[in-house]
Amino acid sequence: MHGMDGAEDPPPRGALAGIGSYALYYGRGYLDSLAAFDLAVLEPRAWIPEDIHLLRERGTRVLAYMSTLEVGVDEFNPSGGYELLHVEGQPLLNHVYNNLLLVPSRHRSETLAAQAQRLIRDYDGVFLDTLGAVEDERIPPDRRLELAIGAGHLVRQLRSACPGAVIVQNMGIWGVHRFTRNYVDGLCWESFPASLSSAPAWLDAKAGELAAWSAGTARRILLLVQDGPLADDEWLSSWASSRGWPVYLAPGDYTTGIGRSLPARGQQ
């Protein structure tokens, strides 16, 4: 397997082998509930290291949440070294979360690598969110390609800085993952359809692409579903288990409590 510059990359480690259930939770508390999962993705600002160590001692692997290419408007510091992503001269904003989008610059890569190195002193690895920001269709196509390549370099630098850590990427499953997939242990497919009636026509084609990649590289796919009255557990369990992909059904906005897991019964 070769990197973007032609250099030989290390073989896949299968770091998430055996993970049958996982939780993604950005709030505080519920440590006992989280201990029931094989893997937990947590917001490090909500936890003290002692709690993380206790959770790991109870057999749960723990990843620290990191926002890679978005920063909240209220957190933005002009002197913080951020390079804002501009379109037609204006900074691009994720209006849903009121976040500014960032360029995957060398400085940003170095900042995130240093942050990840600090986090893995207590955590098993990191969960990279917002890499898919550079797939935003408001960005011209040629610029999106350039930014996706930059995201690939960013993740490769993270892998180089943290060779033994677990790295899971959230989304970026259209253009970005083609440049990052050699350096991650798994991909999380957020906003996965909760039922057959809400599934897009392209679902099986995209799933087939990701299945071929993950089966050939010892990586895992995690499905993240918004729980609710329309969630069809039977369809989700059948669909995911045929591929060996664990499902997490999250309540609310990932901070309101611990959701439900549909364990992966199949094998990749």
Image (tube, rainbow, N blue to C red):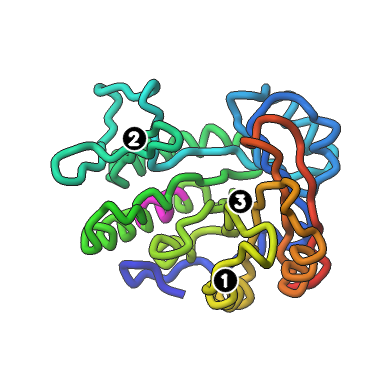
Drawn side of residue 31 relative to residue 6, left or right: right
* Secondary structure state at the residue bearing disc 1: helix
In this orientation, which residue lies closer to the viewer: 189 or 158?
189
Marked residue nearer the N-terminal end (1 or 3): 3
139, above or below 12, in the image: above
In this orientation, which residue lies closer to the viewer: 19 or 254?
254
User: What percent of the width, then of the height, locates residue 206?
Assistant: 53, 72
Q: Residue at x 60, y 32 (%)?
A: 43
Number of numbered discs: 3
Dot 1 amino acid type: Leu
Q: Residue at x 48, y 62 (%)?
A: 173
In this orientation, which residue lies closer to the viewer: 259 or 268?
259
| Residue 203: mark in rendering | 1
User: What percent of the width, then of the height, locates residue 91?
Assistant: 23, 37
Q: Is residue 155 magenta?
A: yes
4, above or below 87, in the image: below
Query: Nearer the viewer's eye, disc 2 or disc 1?
Result: 1
User: Separation of disc 2 and disc 3 at Cα?
Assistant: 27 Å
